[in-house]
């Protein structure tokens, strides 16, 4: 981040504290928030463009950035089925999880009672 952006974020924090104490108005704080939001968005876009432009010279930085954006998990750990045995195969895990979620999210038929207020 640039020094100017850090100063804007620091000013935002200061004005928020002042607003909490009643020394600043909400409109002033909301204007500073808007300016900071725009500056952060521009800084992120600028970072992405720089990484894409310099990918030939800075491959490590580019792939580090890409891997930081990935939030996927590769696999599901072992699960216990109804009898307490470990399930290791993916197809068995799918069937077990499907049965569990189906049992949780289905409505069991029951007596329909009408609620009336007694006065």
Image: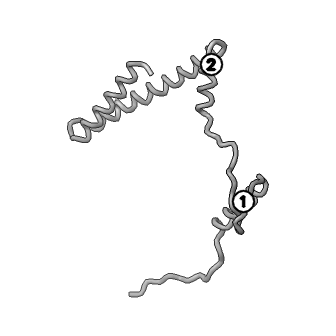
Residue 64 location (% of width, % of height): 60, 26
Residue 91 location (% of width, % of height): 79, 55
Label 2: few (<14), some (14–19) or many (≥20) C-alpha neighbours in 10 Å: some
| Depth order, front residue of 92/87 | 87
Residue at image position (74%, 58%) is 87
View extreme (front): residue: 85
Residue 100 location (% of width, % of height): 68, 64
Q: Secondary structure at mark 2?
A: helix
Q: For the C terminus, which image quadrant?
A: bottom left
Q: Secondary structure at mark 1?
A: strand
Residue 112 location (% of width, % of height): 59, 81
Front tag of 2 and 1? 1
Left or right position of 116 against 99: left
| Depth order, front residue of 88/23 | 88
View extreme (bottom): residue: 119
Position of residue 117 relative to residue 29, above or below, is below
Q: Which mark is residue 106?
A: none
Q: For the N terminus, which image quadrant?
A: top left
Question: Residue 92 occupies which quadrant of the picture?
Answer: bottom right
View extreme (top): residue: 57
- Judging by the rendered image, the residue that carries numbered circle 2 is 52
Question: Residue 27 occupies which quadrant of the picture?
Answer: top left
Position of residue 118 relative to residue 90, above or below, is below
Residue at image position (58%, 31%) is 68
Residue at image position (49%, 27%) is 41
Of marks 2 and 1, which one's residue comes earlier in the chain?
2
Position of residue 87 relative to residue 51, above or below, is below
Q: How many marks?
A: 2
| Cα gap from disc 2 to disc 1, whole angstroms | 45 Å
Label 1: few (<14), some (14–19) or many (≥20) C-alpha neighbours in 10 Å: few
Residue at image position (62%, 20%) is 60
- Judging by the rendered image, the residue that carries numbered circle 1 is 86
């Amino acid at each position: 981040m640039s020094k100017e952006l850090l100063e804007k974020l620091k000013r935002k924090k200061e004005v928020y504290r002042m607003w909490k104490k009643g020394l600043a108005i909400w409109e002033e704080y909301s204007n500073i928030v808007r300016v900071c939001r725009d500056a952060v968005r521009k800084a992120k876009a600028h970072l992405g463009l720089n990484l894409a432009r310099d990918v030939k010279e800075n491959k490590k930085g580019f792939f580090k950035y890409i891997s930081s954006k990935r939030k996927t998990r590769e696999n599901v750990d072992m699960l216990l089925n109804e009898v307490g045995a470990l399930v290791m195969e993916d197809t068995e895990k799918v069937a077990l999880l499907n049965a569990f979620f189906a049992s949780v999210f289905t409505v069991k038929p029951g007596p329909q009672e009408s609620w009336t207020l007694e006065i």
